[in-house]
Amino acid sequence: MSIVADQVRRLDARIDRVSLVPLTHPDHDAELQAVDGAAASALASPRVNELLRIVKALSSGSVSGAHLPASRIQRLLRQSGLTGELPPVELLEAKSQYETDVEWLLVGKATVQTYGLLMSTLLDQIIPLSDDIWHWDEVLTSYPHSFIYTVQTSPLRLWRWTRDVYYESLDRFQRLYRDEIAGQTSEADDLASEPQDGSGSGHRPRRLSSLYPELSKYWRQFYGIVRQSIAERSIGDIQRKILSRVDIGRSEARHKQARLRKLREMTATGLGVLLDEGLNFGAADETYSDEWKGMLERSVALMDMILHSVLSLDISVSEFEDRVFTGVEEDPELSIHIEDSHPAERPAVLARRLLGLLEASLPYHRVAASEVARENGRPSRLVRYWLPAAALLVSSSTILRILINRQDDILNWIRDFGATARDFWFNWVIDPVRKIVGTIRHDANSEIAIMSRDSLKADRDSLERMVVEFAIDNPDIAVGNSVITEGQIVEIRSKVKEGDVTPVLKAYEKDLRRPIVGAISGELVRSLLIQVQKTKVDLEVALSGIDALLKSQELVFGFVGLTPGVLVSIGVFQYLRTLFGSRKGMRHSQKVRRSVRVLRKIDRILSEATTSQNNIISYRDHGLLVCEVHVLRGLAHGVLPGDIEKEFIEDLDELANLKGIGVQMKALERIRWAYAEWLSRMR
């Protein structure tokens, strides 16, 4: 909910309290009495029922936004019949007091809605001015920006100069032509007054051939006038001879910035006056009093004077305040200045003034304020981008020719890029994910393996057979006897499984004493080959250990393989989301940063504020403060949680209310430390 909506609801409730008292207390002596039959019939009349229906439509409870639109307020005022011609005095005197009270209630509701509409209009006009003022600051503090602005606006300055020269020359030529025509007319009159010779010869029509010399003469005269105007303008334009083009552009930017600053100060002052003096009920409360009716008249006059004077940028802020208050005090339509006015016609007079304010004053103010902001704000997009657009237009044929000549290459690049993106997605994202899922589900096809599953078992069985056969063939070396038993064979098998091939090593050691004999007999070669098989088995055992280790960490390796593809995908997705997406997170971060900047502006406003004897800030500072509070309330909606946001709005209301600058500074300090957790997040 905005600050405008809160203000409208609060004032609407005050209108209900002060205006419903006479309706519920028919006797103005404040004594409780029963409503008599005449009063009951007056309240039940179709006219009063229609007015009550319009009052209900004008109430803040029936408004979805901050206030009703101007068109609906106008339509409801016309439907009430108060904006037409005043009825005769007899009908005014015959009007019941209850009908008059309901009319005052209707006019009060319409005044509150118009008040909210004007407040919202002034706020909407102040907020964009800060961005334009910052734009001119950027132009003035940087020479490259000043040069760019000068180049951007050079066609406009040339057009204005050419137009001034043309109109000035045209005006001089028209005056010269009128003087010449007047001279010819006078000469013709003199000739006509002379006596004729009777030959019948008079003034004959000029032939077509005689018009060409005259046209040529007029053209030479106009051309000479144009040259003279250019020469006079060049001599008189001392600024162009002293300052450079960039300095002239900076001077223009400085002038526009000053106008925007003045417009911002005047609008803020008007907003402050409206908030502090408009619809100020004062002591008018639930006890019946007619003071609030005069307050309504003064508030409508105040709104009218603000709309008529807020765009007077040639006066100071103090002069603007004096003009507004003087205009309200001397307003001829106030009832205190009209001696013969009937009390029953006062609501109609006020309703017609509200209708005129909504139909004429407010639309004119909006158009005029928009025109001032447009003339002094940042240049339009056409002015800012005409140079790159012109360069693009000039080079468009070359760019088009390059695109046509490289059409096949461009299509191939696009196809290759698509194929690369597709292969990256499937090979580095989809396949690793599929392998991870297979590992989690113990899929045998997805297990990591350095060697085949049954390779070690086959080689170990082969080694066992080799050693047993070698021991059977050489029992004297293996067991030291000529015969080997089954128990000894079983023992040799068990030792081979544990990696013990002692019988082979003994034979190898024996044959090394006579290697030639052992080589000839073949036992040395046989023992060597068995040891080669033993080495192969040992290598496979080591590999099986590594294989088991890899299998135990297969899920980790799967995620490691998936990580590059996921990181690249996330990076591309975030870039595209930032470029084309909603950018919710970025907007949230921008809201936080902007909230901190608004708090800084509020601190500056309060630190530099001009205070009165009651320690109350001026109208201008109050208007600027309310504007920044309005912006901060909108930013807090997306930054703070719901329950914290309610407390934040309460502190903001205390910051915006005129309770003294000391109370406002304490409220600002409380906002800083109480909501630092949310305001510092994502910065």
Image (cartoon, rainbow, N blue to C red):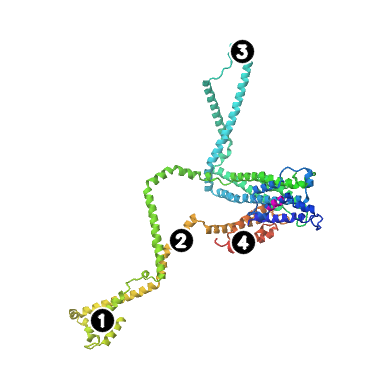
- Contact? badges 2 and 1 (CB < 8 Å): no
In this rendering, is residue 532 above or below 364?
below
Residue 567, position as x, y percentages in the image: 44, 62
Measuring 21% from the left and 82% from the top, which residue is drawn there? Answer: 511
Question: Going by the image, does 442 lie left or right of 167?
Answer: left
Q: Distance between the residues labelled 2 and 3?
A: 106 Å
Q: Residue 210: in sight, yes or no?
A: yes
Residue 266, position as x, y percentages in the image: 66, 48
Q: Mark 3 points at which residue?
A: 196
Sequence-wise, the earlier of marks 4 and 3 is: 3
Kind of element beneath mark 3:
loop
Kind of element beneath mark 1:
helix
- Contact? badges 2 and 4 (CB < 8 Å): no
Number of other residues with Cα within 10 Å of mark 3, as a class: few under 14, some 14 to 19, many 20 or more = few
Q: Which label number is shown at residue 467? A: 1
Q: How far apart are marks 2 and 4 (CA)?
A: 33 Å
Measuring 63% from the left and 19% from the top, which residue is drawn there? Answer: 189
